Amino acid sequence: MSAQPTTALVTGATSGIGKAVAKKLAADGMTVIVVGRDARRGAATVDEITAAGGRARFVEADLEDPAAIDRLAASAGEIDVLVNNAGRSVWAPTEDLELADYDAMFAGNVRAPFLLVAAFAPAMAAKGSGSVISLGSMAGTVGLVNGAAYGATKAALAALTRGWAAEYSGRGVRFNTVAPGPVYTRPEARDLFDALAETTAMKRAADPAEIAEVVSFLASPKASYVTGATIAVDGGRTAI
């Protein structure tokens, strides 16, 4: 079993699932690099972590810009855990979806994780340990109205995870996808989450902290034999 990881980088960590993951990994004893586009929210996340006795710092980065990923990698240095959480979702009928939104979703949801793995996985493999967790979605498995392009990005991310497992897991780096269902991440969208919750077996949406618990497990040595998997955390939605 590998040693307890000490440093985690979490993208999109200034709100929602990413913030919950950053706080949980810090509570687990890791130093967390909080990545996001909003410096004010980033500082607030770091303050919450440090007030609870954890260790964190913020790095501002727009991951849809490949040059920003290069700068992030240089600033972060060596890490033990990478959480690809940042992403974009635009919901629209296929004929109405703007090409710019389509391209931005693939840049943020697929290309950015690919470039981050390219930046960090070789060093993990060289030392023989590491864990990369990517946040997928039930939309990558089930068809959702107005979500064709978004779902395609999440299906692509799961496929990347399997490919990375084949490429790097023989050298000690584990790759997994966590695929949530509806999660209460934006108060203004509660009605939407409630409607999606009714399609799940458990008839409720998740709290971001529930997703963070699964990420925490996959980041830890307790998941030492788990790689290449997509873990559904969707209240049973993809089971029914």
Image: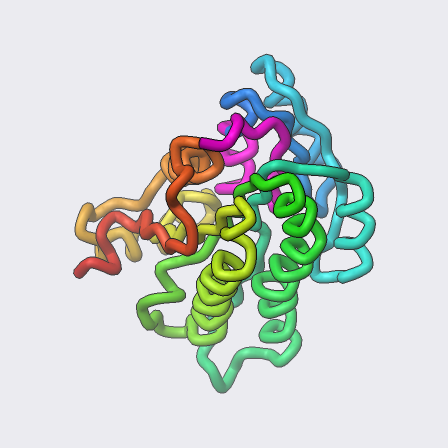
Q: Which residues are magenta?
A: 1-24
The quarter of the picture where residue 207 lies is top left
Q: Is residue 208 visible?
A: no
The quarter of the picture where residue 212 lies is top left
Q: Residue sitting at 18 percent across and 51 percent down?
A: 201
Quarter of the image with the C terminus in it: bottom left
Horizontal side of 227 relative to 11 (left or right) equals left
Horizontal side of 147 relative to 73 (left or right) equals left
Residue 126 at x, y percent in the picture: 66, 45
- Nearer-the-camera pick, 221 or 20: 221
Horizontal side of 138 relative to 89 (left or right) equals left
Quarter of the image with the N terminus in it: top left
Q: Residue sitting at 38 percent across and 64 percent down?
A: 139
- Queried whether the magenta region covers residue 157, the answer comes back as no
- Nearer-the-camera pick, 221 or 60: 221
Residue 218, placed above or below residue 180: above
- Here the colouring is rainbow
Q: Is residue 90 visible?
A: yes
Residue 84, placed above or below residue 58: below
- Queried whether the magenta region covers residue 8, the answer comes back as yes
- Nearer-the-camera pick, 222 or 239: 222
Residue 147 at x, y percent in the picture: 42, 71
Residue 147, placed above or below residue 192: below
Horizontal side of 25 relative to 122 (left or right) equals left
Q: Residue sitting at 45 percent across and 34 percent down?
A: 216
Q: Residue sitting at 57 percent across and 62 percent down?
A: 109
Residue 136 at x, y percent in the picture: 45, 56
How many numbered dots are placed on residues in this image? 0
Residue 233 at x, y percent in the picture: 32, 47
